[in-house]
Image: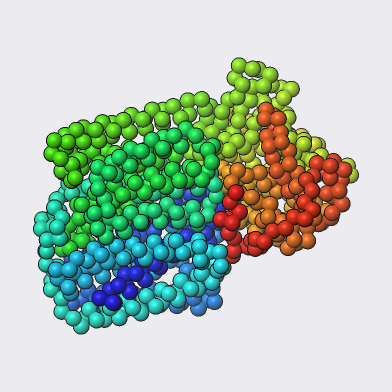
Amino acid sequence: MLFFTLSVFLSAFLLFQVQPMIAKFILPWFGGTPAVWSTVMLFFQALLTGGYAYAYWLIERVRSARQGIVHLVLVGLSLVVLLVLGASGSPPILPGADWKPQGTAFPVWDIFKILTVAVGLPYFVLSTNAPLMQAWFSRIFPGRSPYRLYALSNFGSLLALVSYPILFEPWLTLRIQGWAWSGAYLLFGLLAGYGSYRLMRRRLPAQTPRVDTGTTTAAERPSVGLRILWILLSACASTLLLAVTSQISQEVAVIPFLWVLPLTIYLLTFILTFSSERWYVRPLYSLLLLVCSVMVVWALFHPAAKFVSLIAIYCAFLFVSCMVCNGELVALKPAPAYLTSFYLMSSLGGAIGGVFVNLVAPYIFRGYWELLVGLAGCWVLLAILSFSRKTDFLPRKLQFGYRATIGGLAVVAIIFSFYYVSGAFSDVRFAGRNFYGILRVKELNANDPEWRAYNMIHGIIQHGIQFEAAEQRGLPTTYYTEESGVGLAILNYPHEGRGLRVGVLGLGTGTLAAFGQPGDAYRFYEINPAVIGLAEGDGGYFSFLADSKAAITVAPGDARLSLENELKSDQPQNFDILVLDTFSSDSIPVHLVTKDAFALYLEHLQPEGILAAHITNQHLDLQPVLWQLANCYSLSRVVIENKGDGVRSFTSVWMLLARDPKLLEIPAIAQAATSMEGYTTSILLWTDDYSNLFQILK
C-alpha cells in the first residue's frame, strides 16, 4: 500500500508543479499575454488525455504479464531522454534560447512544439501513473475501492499548486526550480520502474472483479449516454476553469498566483467529491449556484469594481459550479473494472473544454463569452440530471417542483447569455479578438462634432483616443499629452536642432507620433497584429501614424525579441528617448521590467538618452520595481504624475530615468516631478530568472 501511496502522490505533485514553472519560463517569448497560460493548460490537458488513453490500452488490451514490461520500457526511455538533455549543463526541462519563436501572429503551435520537446515525454509518463496505479491496486486488492487513491492524487496536485507561488517562485530561480523538478522526476522514475518490475514478477487476475461500490452503475457496463455525460460534465468544468482564469488574469497580471488560484479551486472540488459523496448535496449546491450566478452577472456589468471583489466572485462561482459538475460526475462513476475508461472520458472532456476555449472561442466570439457558455452549460447539465435521476434529500412531493425550478433557471441562463452577447458590443464600431485579447473601437461624443472621437479599448483599459475634427485631430491625448511625463521628455529633450530618435514599446493608437517633427524618427514595437492594423488606418478611425511629420516605422512582434534581434544584426537604434508602454489590458508583461530587459534597453539608448516608463496601473505598484532597476544601473530618476482633465487627458504616472542627471533637471521636467526624497523599497531586483508580482499588488 505504501508503494501505491508514494507513487501516486509524487506523480501528481510533479504533474502540477511543472505547469506554472514552464509557463512562467516561456511567457516572455510570447508577449506575456494571459493566453499563454490557457494554451499551456490545453497542451497539458491533451497530454493527460493521451496518458489516460495509454493506461486504458495497457489495462484493457495488454496481457497482465506484459503490462509491467511495456511500462518499464516507457519509464526507462523518459529517464534516458532526461539525462541526455541534462548533459548540456542546463535544466533538461527548460528549453534553450534557440527555441524562441520568430513569428507571433498565432503562437499556439509554437507553444505546443516547445512544450513537447521540453517536457512532453516526462509529463506523458506522469499522466499515466494515477490510472495505472489505481487499476493495478484494484487487481492486487480486490474488494477495496481505488477511488481514494484518486483523491490522494488530487491532494498531491493541490499541494504542488499551492506551494509554487508561496514557496518555490518567491525563493528559487527558474534554473534551480528546473533542476529540482528534474531530480524529483528521476526519483519518481526509479520508483515507477521498481513498481513495473514487481508487477512483472507477480501474476494478476486478467480483469478487475466487478464489486459493487454503492454507485448506481457499479455492476453495469457504462452505456454510451453515460459516457457522454462523463465527457460533458468534465468539459463544462474545464471550460469554466479556463474562462475564470482568463477573466481574473487579463485585468490584473499574468502571474502564477492568479493562474494557480482557479486551478487550486478546481482540484479542491475533485478532492472533496471523490473522497466522499457526502460533500455534494444537489439541492444545497443548486441554491449556491443560483447565488453565485447572480453575483457573476453583477460582476459582468461592473468590470471596474475592485479587483479583489471580482476575484472573490469569480472564484466562488468556479468552486460551486465545479462542485456541481464533479459531484454529479462522482454520482455516475462506474465499478473499478471500468475506471480507466471513466478517467479517459473525463480527461477527454477536459481536453474538449480546453480546445473550445483556446481554439474555437477566439474565432466564433468577439468577447470572453466562454464564461457564459460554461454558466449556461452547468445549469443545463444540472437540469438534465435532475430530470433523469432522483434528487436525494428531497421529499417525493417536492421532486417535481425542484425539477421545474432547475429547468426554468437553465432556460433563464441560456436566454441571458444570448441577451448579454447580443448587446455587449451594440455601441462598438469595431470589435476583434485574437490570441492577445479583445480589441474594440468605440465612438465618443457622437452628437458633438467638435469633440467627436474614437477610442481604442483593450479589455477594459482605454489605449488611445483621437478626435475627428480637423483642428483637434492632431492633438496627443489620454496618457500622452504635453503635460504627461513622456510629453515633457519629448518636448524638452535638448536635441539641438537635429532630428529626435524615439523608440516606443507598445503602439496603441500611435498617439506619440503626434509629437513628431520633420527630421524625427519614431519606431514603434507592437506584438498584436490587430493593433497595428487599426493604428495604420484600418477602418479610418486613427491616423496619428499617417499624419505624423516624423519618419514612422512599426516593428511587429514582441518588443524585447525585436530589440534582441536588432542587436544580433548589429543594428543598435541609438534612441534619444525610449518609451516603455507595453500593456495587455491593465497587465504589464513582466519580462519587460527585469534587469536583463533594462540592459537591452540601455544598449539601444544613446548615453544622453531618457527612458520613459509608463507605470499607471490600477492593481500593481510598479514604482519599487523601477526604483531597484534604476539603482542597479546607477540611473537618475523622477516620477511625474498628471491628473488630467478627464476629456482629452487621463490620469497618468510616468517614471523618467537617465544616466545623465542633468536631463532630469531641465526646469519643465523638474517642476512637474514628484519628490522621491527618502523613498526606499525592500523588494528584490527582478531578473529573467526571478520576479514576484504578488508582492506589488495594491
In percent of the image, x 54 and y 41: which residue is there?
A: 306
Depicted 3 relative to depicted 95: above or below:
below
Residue at x-position 67% and y-position 28% = 647
Q: Identify the residue shown where x is 50% and y is 62%.
A: 166
Quarter of the image that includes the N terminus: bottom left
Residue nearer the viewer, 104 or 161: 161
Give percent across and percent down for residue 694.
56, 55
Residue at image coords 65%, 61%: 683
Q: Is residue 263 visible?
A: yes
Which residue occupies the foreground of this view, 533 or 401? Answer: 401
Find residue 563 and report its image quarter: bottom right
Looking at the image, is 456 positioned above or below residue 623?
above
In the displayed structure, 72 sits above or below 413; it is: below
Horizontal side of 126 relative to 536 (left or right) equals left
Residue 453 in the image: state x and y as whole percent: 63, 25
Instruction: List the single residue furthest toward the bottom.
Output: 201
445 shown above or below 608: above
Front residue of 320 and 467? 320
Residue 577 seen in render? no
In terms of image quadrants, where is residue 209? bottom left
